[in-house]
Amino acid sequence: MVTRVVPSVCCHDCGGSCPLNIYVENERIVKIEARDLGIPALRPCARGLLYHYRVHHPDRLQYPMKRAGERGEGKFVRISWDEALSEIAAQLTRIRDIYGPAAIFNQTMSGSLAQLHSLTLTPRFLNMAGGHGQRWGGASFQGGFFGSMATYGRTDTGNDRADLLNSRMIFLWGCNPAESIFSTETRWYLLQAKERGTRIVCVDPRLTETASTLASQWVPIRPGTDAAMLVAMAYVILEHGLQDQAFLDKHTVGFDMFRDYVTGEEEGIAKTPEWAEKITGVPAATIRQLALEYATSKPAAILAGWAPGRTSRGEQYHRLTATLQAMTGNIGLRGGAAAGLDMNFGILPVETTASKDYSLDIYGFILSMLSNPVSQDKPLHEYAVEGIRDHTIDRVNFTKIWDAELRGKVGGYYSDIKMTYIAGGNPICQAPMSNQGAQALKKLEFVVVHEMFLTPTAKFADILLPVCSWCERNDIRFAWMFGHYAMYANKAIEPLYETKTDLQIFTELASKLGIHGYNDRTEDEWLQLFAAQHGIPDYEAFKANSFHKQESPEPWVTFQSQIKEPERYPFPTPSGKIEIYCQRIADFNRHEALPPIPKYVEGWEGVNDALAEQYPLQLITTHPPKSVHSQYQNIPWVRDIEPHAVWINPLDAKARNIRNGDRVKVFNDRGIISLAVKVTSRIMPGVVCIYEGAWYAPDASGVDQGGCANVLIKGDHSPGGALCSNSALVQIEKA
Ligand SMILES: Nc1nc2c(c(=O)[nH]1)N[C@H]1C(S)=C(S)[C@@H](COP(=O)(O)OP(=O)(O)OC[C@H]3O[C@@H](n4cnc5c(=O)[nH]c(N)nc54)[C@H](O)[C@@H]3O)O[C@H]1N2
Ligand SMILES: Nc1nc2c(c(=O)[nH]1)N[C@H]1C(S)=C(S)[C@@H](COP(=O)(O)OP(=O)(O)OC[C@H]3O[C@@H](n4cnc5c(=O)[nH]c(N)nc54)[C@H](O)[C@@H]3O)O[C@H]1N2
Ligand code: SF4
Ligand SMILES: [Mo]
């Protein structure tokens, strides 16, 4: 038997990028191994190594299908590609002509995140077909995006992970790279740093694998209160005169106003560690100790995870991490960090003074989404501020799509939505308000889904199209942080059954609709062009090795030039400086929940909310360590090694007479889910955790037996537009 070994890279949406060898026998993938590039940091996890279980899963969708039963029932009949594409073209034209293009919505999410096959394919197609209803505010990092834009005018604020070796102290704030990756190299460099004696502190309501293996201190904190701890740390730094005043004077605007807020000059409340202890649950002595240690351990880095940003006032946390790094002069410095969004895509860092404010641009996707005839292309952060004034703007926030689909113009939205297009996403499970989502998808006139599997969302399709996995196509892949490398995802096998790539599908649909220019190159031509644009000299060698590393003398540190030569390299903000006070925020709005200087602003569904009487537990819905969102839910070994369960502290369990392994109901006004319970002191009292990603499976009485966390998450956003998947109050009872 001839075995072919295909060099490739894992293309999952985890922030990593891991080299793989894919073994193929008789057009079947029989094994996937780690490919040794001599870079010890780049080691894949089980999801990459077992991807063939998804590729060759017996439930793979094999041919195009058309709905047979009621919408959502999951009954389909086989049709031909030509019938399927003709029906989509006809329905799209009908709906666009009757209701206008804004009636067609794009709900594609992160199913495909390589550079060519990406989430831009859907909006590109819909824009060329006349425009579409668009969203603002994403699921992932809107809090960081907004905070970064406000403070730095830029979102690509990350440093090379290798630079962590230069830090004397590292905060992993709501950040769990041992399990949620964030660039494959992160945990390896953290381990090296720890071995060198760097102090690593994890601030997290849970004792994660990161906290227990990489950190020297775990600081449990109430969800959504991180801003208060950061403000109190600023208080201690000021109290001891430890701020880097020269840095603040030279590189920032608005620090005086921030200082007055912190000391209590502004509103009479000094933001002492004792003040913060009541809000955060973190002992004042701990806050003091950490603040003093931080301010005297230069260079220090705060790695700002995105989970605290997914709370009802999440952008304040992101702005404060940047403000503290500025107060301690730790920006643009080896071993420091700019915080903010803390992400960086691509092979080569580019020193730019330009503002980068469109979220999809930062990924460097090959096919642009082009401009949308229906929606204005203004900077996205402006939508954030308009969005809290009212929601009659020409976009719908990610968290309110179901509501917009259900209520349309009557509900104050800009359009009545009639059709949705989902090409890579499982929004019933992954967007808030799953119960409402099921209602919304039933109400629409037409639903198209491109999928590998019959997911809870795919069940609602009118036309369901089978797509290839990333082993059945060619692509290029970057990680979320510069490692100065790109990887080539080589096609290991031909597309199985009748599957096609999303790009092929949209290309064929475009030609059915008489659209020119959707895609005028082959896969290989696009990738070759892209490689050349990114300075990869020999495309064939890149493809054969599946790897290109751009040599760089030392690890990249963002904003080094801005700090060294501020006249030549101003920050891309209106003031040219780091904006602790943001005039743009002040100009657009006077909403107290979105102040122009970063503050702790109490949000909804925290411990002081009136709802806490009825629903006393704070729910966080963390990314599943052994899955990519909802993607491994149908792989039995994942369920075996990571049984789906709600985490609860022994004190809270005892008070409810609940024992480890019991089946429980977790509920609030938005719904009820049923799942097993994991009693563990690895989560702080008062907080419970359910991993996102479980497949929604309501029973006849409406109780979700799948245990999908998004049944319980509110369909509302932070003022800056963030999904609030870590701001929800619930109660738990024995089932
Ligand atoms: N409660 C809660 N909800 C969350 C989060 C949270 O923390 N808590 N996190 C949010 C975040 S950060 C994100 S990024 C989103 C992710 O949300 P989604 O992107 O909806 O998540 P996935 O479950 O990965 O769904 C992707 C789907 O695409 C399919 N797929 C895979 N490859 C392809 C392909 O090439 N083409 C097509 N057409 N389909 C493909 C997969 O089978 C899968 O069903 O979830 C968000 N939802
Ligand atoms: N294994 C795995 N890795 C992934 C993904 C996946 O699905 N699975 N998804 C990828 C994607 S798309 C994204 S966007 C990233 C998301 O990565 P993150 O944004 O880091 O998200 P989470 O894993 O949800 O949360 C990280 C940690 O924050 C803690 N946390 C939750 N709420 C709070 C809070 O209010 N304050 C503080 N201090 N901590 C809090 C959680 O307990 C958790 O340990 O992960 C990526 N990596
Ligand atoms: S899922 Fe992420 S960490 Fe795991 S192999 Fe794939 S890219 Fe690497
Ligand atoms: Mo994400």
Image (spheres, rainbow, N blue to C red):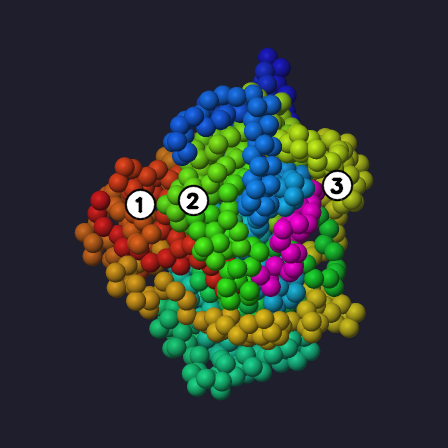
Q: Quadrant of residue 569?
A: bottom right
Which label number is shown at residue 664?
Answer: none
Q: Which residues are magenta?
A: 359-383
Which residue is disc 1 drawn over? 673
> Considering depth in this image, is 611 or 464 the residue closer to the camera?
464
- Spatial separation of the CA atoms under disc 1 and disc 2: 19 Å
Q: Which residue appears at 47% of the width and 47% of the height?
A: 405
Q: Nearer the viewer, mark 1 or mark 3?
A: 1
- Counting from the top left corner in percent of width and height, residue 727 is at 40, 59
The CA distance from mark 1 to mark 3 is 46 Å
Q: 10 Å neighbourhood of mark 3: few (<14), some, or many (≥20)?
A: some
Magenta stretch: residue 412 in it? no
**Picture residue at 57% right of the left edge, 37% below the top:** 94
Cβ atoms at labels 1 and 3 below 8 Å apart: no
The image position of residue 418, as x and y in percent, is 50, 43
Q: Residue at x 40, y 28 (%)?
A: 69
Which kind of residue does numbered mark 3 sit on? Phe
Question: Looking at the picture, how far across and down is residue 536, in whole percent?
Answer: 77, 41
In the rendered image of this protein, does residue 653 appear above or below residue 290?
Answer: above
Which disc is residue 530 wearing? Answer: 3
**Residue ID for mark 2:** 440
- When asked about the image quadrant of residue 113, the answer is top right
Task: Check the image and name the residue furthest to the right.
Answer: 537
